[in-house]
Image (spheres, helix red, strand yellow):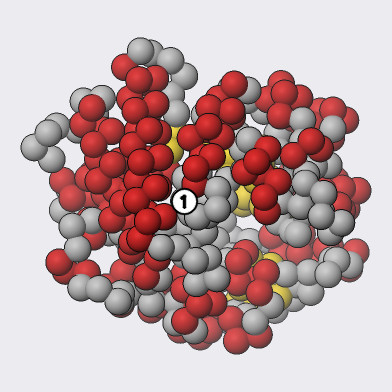
Amino acid sequence: MNMSEGVMLQVIEYIVNDDSFMVHVQFFGGEPLIRWEQLQEFVIIAKEKAKIKEKNIQFGMTTNGTLLDEKKLTWLKENNISFLLSHDGIQKAHDHFRKYANGRGSFDDIDLALISKYFPDIQIRPTITPETIEFFADSVRFFARFGFRNIATEPAYEKSVNWKETDFQKLAKVYEELASMYAKAKLQGEKPFIFKFIEDARRGIRNQKMNIKPAGFLCGIGKNSYGIDAMGRIYPCQRYASNLDPRTVIGDVWNGIEKDKLENFWWKIKRENMKSFANCKECKVAFACFGGCNACNYEEYGDPLQIHENFCEYLRVAIPIGVKALKATKEVENGD
């Protein structure tokens, strides 16, 4: 579904007339670069209107990189538009799932060397599955050859992905390897790796020290982050917008957000309201748990507060290894 010119202009009006001083616009798809000319038009018009309103407006996007070329990268750089790159790493891993409709893999169509020339510090978002675990450490080393060291490390844990206990054991071995890479780079003064599971452990330890209860859903869903679909309907986040479920619509760009619908959603993002299939009070990694993805929980169970069973298993693997990495680099004390 493509956004019409009329809806696009109204989205811009809604954004620039928002009460906040700064707004960050993130383009999602599908693949946003398919609509490259419209993306450029959106940015140009929004910048002009934001300037009149004295509003700070920033842009970003998520892309698979297949349509990035020097001309686009130059324009993105000139307009200070960074992006998250969806890429699964070495060719065996990447082409396992990231195929075109004709079955051909997309690995060869992504020029990482060219991308790193313009954006060496972007975050890479691999999708980790049982089928690609064995390649993940090699994939991280592959990204590092191009200077990319900010890697989102979180698996696809939906019910459609068949995780077994043996798969989590394999994941633990891979994460131990990543933790060693992190510690080595840190201790030797190299460009640091940024791995999400280590940052989650760091946040959990900090909150624990400061006696702060873990927050629910750290993405800002329903608070300072919303999703807008191609029809101009507003959702609590972009993933809800991608699903086009009318039950999760909280407003539109013509009439704004409906206060009662938004307030009704807020109780669904409170950490104390979440529930899991295990006993959270007895969980050793509860200090670093934020509930996973609210929209994913809703998709899987029809309940955004029902923490996914695979997410619990994942955290029990990832957080202790993250803590271990932070202790190895003396970023936290062994008593923490």
Considering depth in this image, is 174 or 267 the residue closer to the camera? 174
| SS for dot 1 | loop
Q: Residue at x 78, y 69 (%)?
A: 230
Instruction: Locate the N terminus by quadrant.
Output: bottom right
The structure residue drawn at horizontal position 42% and vertical position 43%, both measured from the top left corner, is 196
Residue 184 to residue 125: above or below: above
Pick the residue in front: 198 or 39.
Answer: 198
Q: Residues within 10 Å of mark 1 (few under 14, many from 20)?
A: some
Using the image as rendered, state which of residue 58 and residue 102 is in the foreground. 102
User: Residue 180, image x and y in percent?
Assistant: 34, 28
Q: Residue 179 location in percent, x, y? A: 35, 33
Q: Is residue 141 above or below residue 276?
A: above
Does the rendering let one see residue 295? no
In percent of width and height, residue 226 lies at 59, 65
- The picture quadrant where one finds residue 13 is bottom right
User: Residue 31: where, in percent of width, then height?
Assistant: 77, 54
The one nearer the camera, 306 or 143, is 143
Say which quarter of the image contains residue 192.
top left
Residue lying at the far top in this picture: please name it: 188
Left or right: 301 as drawn, with respect to 233:
left
What amino acid type should be assigned to the residue bearing mark 1? Glu
Left or right: where does residue 323 sit relative to residue 311? left
Residue under numbered circle 1: 154
Task: Tell me if 34 is positioned left or right of 142 in this view.
Answer: right
Q: Is residue 2 above or below residue 191?
A: below
- The structure residue drawn at horizontal position 33% and vertical position 37%, both measured from the top left corner, is 176
